[in-house]
Image (spheres, rainbow, N blue to C red):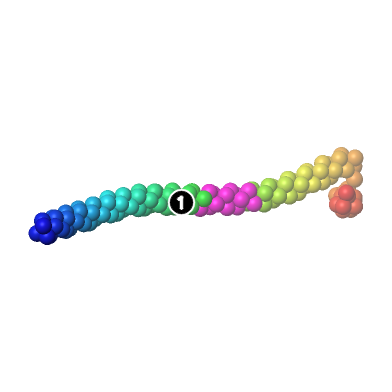
Amino acid sequence: MSDSYEKQIDDLRAELAEAKAANDALQEKVAAEQQAEFDAKIAAFEATLAEKDEQISSFETQVSEAETKIAEQAEAIKNGEKDMEEKMKELREMKKKEAKAARKAQLEDVGLEAEAVESTLASFEDV
């Protein structure tokens, strides 16, 4: 009877060894599948990250271009204001000369001599 128990023990040991081998194979298969899934997720995250980096770079370029354009427009406005001030100054000078010429003509029409006209006009300079 002990031979039959020995045989049963040997059979059970063989089954146990097979079960351990099957278990090890399953664990390796699960680990490989998990690793593949993990690698796929990492690849997806890296692709998303690359896409986001590209978008950020594009936005930074757009911001830089907008800042450059704003600076150019601010400079153009500054130059336009400066030009307008110069033109207004020229216009005031022209109006002043025009008013002086009109006064001179009126004074000469009234009959004042050139020296008296110049003297009278000099008194109107500050007006």
Q: Nearer the viewer, residue 119 or 73?
A: 73
Quadrant containing the N terminus in the rendered view: bottom left
Neighbourhood count class around disc 1 (C-alpha, 10 Å): few under 14, some 14–19, many 20 upward: few
Q: Is residue 76 magenta?
A: yes
Residue 26 in the image: state x and y as whole percent: 23, 52
Q: Look at 27% across and 51% down and name the residue there.
A: 30
Residue 68 in the image: state x and y as whole percent: 53, 52
Residue 82 in the image: state x and y as whole percent: 67, 52
Q: Look at 64% across and 51% down and name the residue there.
A: 78
Q: Look at 26% across and 54% down and name the residue there.
A: 27
Q: Is residue 24 magenta?
A: no
Three-letter amino acid code at disc 1?
Ile
Magenta segment range? 64-78
Q: Nearer the viewer, residue 7 or 3?
A: 3
Q: Main secondary structure of the magenta part?
A: helix
* Mark 1: secondary structure: helix
Q: Look at 20% across and 54% down and name the residue there.
A: 19
Q: Is residue 6 above or below residue 70?
A: below
- Whether residue 114 sits left or right of residue 49 in the image: it is right
Residue 24 in the image: state x and y as whole percent: 22, 56
Identify the residue at the far left of this view: 3
- Whether residue 72 sits left or right of residue 47 in the image: it is right
The residue wearing badge 1 is 56
Identify the residue at the far front of this view: 1
